[in-house]
Image (tube, grey):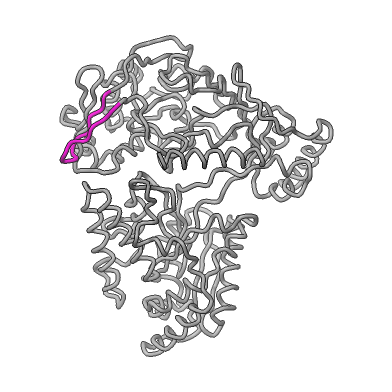
């Protein structure tokens, strides 16, 4: 049924093209009375940005609430509601001076009251009030002084490390120095809210019943909210930065079949955006009348994908877990696997046109974080690693021969069975695993390794496969939570429950290598005031992890494809927080931007970014 529906859709799309003619490439921008229209298929359950952790739901808050700081289109931290800030010498307090004359408005755009420092205090007290069940409260634990203690005991909030001094001075006191504190400030739990409205509505604040359950201070106000029908954002003329809000009105219309219908409606000119998913992409790219209308999204640095080894296997005996355990502790065996993996070939499954653009040689993606204009992945310890492809046929064979000799001495038998798992409902992942298995068996020899590619459950894959140790090798991913290289170590940190490496207590022959990594990581985490020293220490720990093949870096997030009338390179950008959900800064074009115009926009963005970097 679904296939038939897609065929009907394609016929409709192409018939529309022939009726209406080809789309032009005009760059004329119409923003005086611009209305940007799109569909959505999943309704939010709340408008309350103080409690939700859903990226889908926080999109509303991102566009209607301004934060202390924000990110520009190049990923630079810039002032927003705060005009300046100062960190104490000991790193334990951060003082913000707020912008004067910024107002809360209601859904009609009527002024309610001035935004003050107290609104940040009131909002944080709401987040830390247990009965409101904020999903983001835990972000404050261990960060804001006494936040967890207040949440657990619900005692005197005056002990919590957030204070207002007058209307325009706000001070946060931290549990310990946090060099990346500012990057937390675009999360919902640090957004302000008008205190009297919180007191009045309590748990009904932000209820998904209408636009009157919030007040607004951001680029837009929600003028219409009818669940499973329509959302309308109207430009907030009272906003301090209204001159940079170019789209006057945004109309989001609910349709449960949005993913299916959007491409046809975009071609017809009834909406201004449509995601082009993989099942339609090839058809659109093959057709002369549509191929130029499909453009690639921005390259993302929010997620890192990598292959991990299971040092404590708990899979079925038929896959010989004890034999695998002997093999995986041998460094030459792991290096053979790493050197034999043709990652570009594997990435062609998800990105047949530009697979090399997704390739990731480090765990931390390039362009994620910088120090004095030097990219973290170009720090000395990571520089050579970041520039090379680990795939090397000759070295794979050399490591294989070394490993074979060493493993025979500890009683390992060949071929070593390698259980490679994927989620059952992911066709691309399944095909990627097949490509990797076949390619590596051909290179290393089926007498050395034998891959077993096996589906895991579609639901609860992480708990059923990864957490149970039911794999030998597995592709995992980790997303950035803040602007610091530490965020990408949380999968490999023995102090955290997310750790995937052997713990310090496990008695394995690989223990000395693991212990050295943990020592390097601890040293990095303890360096909190000298940022260059901190980044250097983290880069050395990450390089050690990769050089010893404890993990195999794989890719960044796949790039999306779409038809759009917005210049995506004008939007706010950061790998964390709410920045990429904002419409502020983007201009509206009269026609769908063809991929040539998008590439020009990208080139302009890259040139301006370089100019900013060079001063």
Q: For the point 45% across and 50% down, which residue is it? A: 303
Q: Residue 115: x and y, percent?
A: 33, 17
Residue 146 visible somewhere in the drawing:
no
Compared to residue 80, the image places residue 212 above or below, namely above
In front of the other: 95 or 429? 95
Q: Position of residue 213 (x, y in %)?
A: 42, 19
Q: How many marks?
A: 0
Q: Is residue 453 above or below residue 63?
A: below
Q: Residue at x 66, y 26 (%)?
A: 28
Q: Is residue 93 magenta?
A: yes
Question: x, y percentage for residue 263?
Answer: 69, 37
- Indicate the quadrant where residue 232 lies: top right
The extreme front residue here reads 615
Magenta residues span: 84-97
**In the rendered image of this protein, does residue 139 appear above or below residue 468?**
above
Give 547 or 195, whichever is nearer the viewer: 547
Q: Position of residue 436 (x, y in %)?
A: 56, 69
Position above or below: 532 against 136: below
């Amino acid at each position: 049924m679904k296939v038939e529906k897609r065929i009907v859709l394609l016929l409709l799309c192409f018939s529309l093209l022939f009726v209406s003619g080809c789309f032009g490439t005009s760059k004329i921008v119409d923003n005086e009375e611009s209305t940007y229209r799109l569909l959505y298929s999943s309704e939010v359950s709340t408008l309350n940005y103080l409690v939700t952790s859903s990226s889908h739901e926080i999109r509303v808050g991102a566009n209607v609430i301004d934060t202390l700081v924000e990110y520009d289109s190049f990923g630079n931290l810039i002032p927003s509601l705060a005009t300046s800030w100062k960190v104490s010498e000991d790193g334990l307090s951060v003082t913000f001076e707020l912008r004067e004359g910024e107002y809360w408005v209601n859904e009609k755009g009527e002024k309610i009251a001035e935004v003050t420092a107290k609104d940040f205090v009131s909002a944080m007290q709401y987040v830390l009030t247990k009965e409101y069940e904020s999903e983001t409260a835990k972000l404050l634990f261990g960060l804001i002084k006494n936040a967890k203690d207040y949440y657990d005991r619900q005692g005197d909030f005056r002990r919590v490390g957030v204070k207002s001094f007058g209307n325009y001075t706000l001070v946060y006191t931290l549990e310990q120095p946090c060099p990346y504190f500012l990057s937390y400030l675009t999360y919902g739990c640090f957004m302000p809210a008008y205190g009297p409205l919180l007191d009045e509505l309590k748990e009904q604040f932000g209820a998904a019943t209408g636009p009157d359950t919030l007040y607004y201070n951001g680029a837009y106000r929600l003028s219409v909210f009818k669940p499973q029908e329509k959302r309308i954002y109207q430009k907030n003329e009272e906003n301090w930065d209204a001159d940079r809000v170019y789209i006057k009105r945004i109309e989001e219309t609910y349709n449960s079949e949005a993913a299916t219908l959007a491409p046809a409606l975009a071609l017809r000119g009834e909406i201004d955006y449509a995601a082009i998913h993989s099942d339609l992409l090839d058809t659109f790219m093959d057709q002369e009348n549509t191929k130029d209308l499909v453009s690639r999204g921005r390259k993302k640095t929010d997620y890192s994908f990598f292959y991990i080894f299971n040092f404590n296997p708990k899979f079925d005996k038929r896959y010989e877990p004890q034999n695998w355990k002997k093999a995986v502790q041998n460094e030459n065996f792991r290096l053979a696997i790493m050197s034999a993996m043709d990652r570009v070939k594997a990435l062609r499954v998800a990105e047949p046109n530009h697979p090399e653009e997704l390739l990731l040689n480090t765990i931390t993606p390039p362009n994620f974080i910088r120090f004095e204009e030097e990219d973290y992945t170009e720090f000395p310890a990571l520089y050579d690693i970041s520039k090379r492809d680990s795939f090397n046929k000759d070295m794979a064979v050399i490591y294989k021969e070394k490993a074979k000799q060493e493993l025979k001495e500890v009683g390992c038998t060949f071929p070593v069975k390698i259980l490679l798992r994927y989620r059952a409902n992911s066709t691309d992942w399944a095909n990627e695993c097949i490509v990797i298995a076949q390619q590596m068996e051909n290179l290393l020899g089926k007498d050395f390794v034998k891959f077993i590619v096996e589906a895991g459950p579609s639901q609860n894959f992480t708990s059923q496969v990864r957490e149970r140790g039911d794999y030998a090798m597995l592709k995992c991913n980790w997303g950035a939570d803040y602007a610091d290289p530490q965020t990408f170590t949380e999968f490999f940190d023995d102090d955290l429950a997310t750790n995937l490496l052997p713990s310090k207590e496990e008695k394995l022959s690989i223990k000395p290598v693991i212990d050295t990594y943990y020592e390097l990581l601890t040293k990095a985490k303890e360096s909190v005031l000298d940022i260059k020293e901190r980044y250097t220490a983290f880069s050395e720990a990450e390089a050690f992890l990769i050089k010893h093949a404890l993990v195999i870096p794989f890719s960044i997030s796949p790039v999306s494809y779409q038809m759009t009338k917005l210049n995506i390179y004008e939007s706010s950008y950061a790998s964390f927080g709410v920045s990429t959900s904002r419409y502020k800064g983007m201009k509206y074009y009269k026609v769908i931007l063809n991929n040539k115009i998008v590439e020009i926009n990208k080139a302009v963005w890259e040139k301006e970014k370089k100019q900013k970097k060079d001063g």
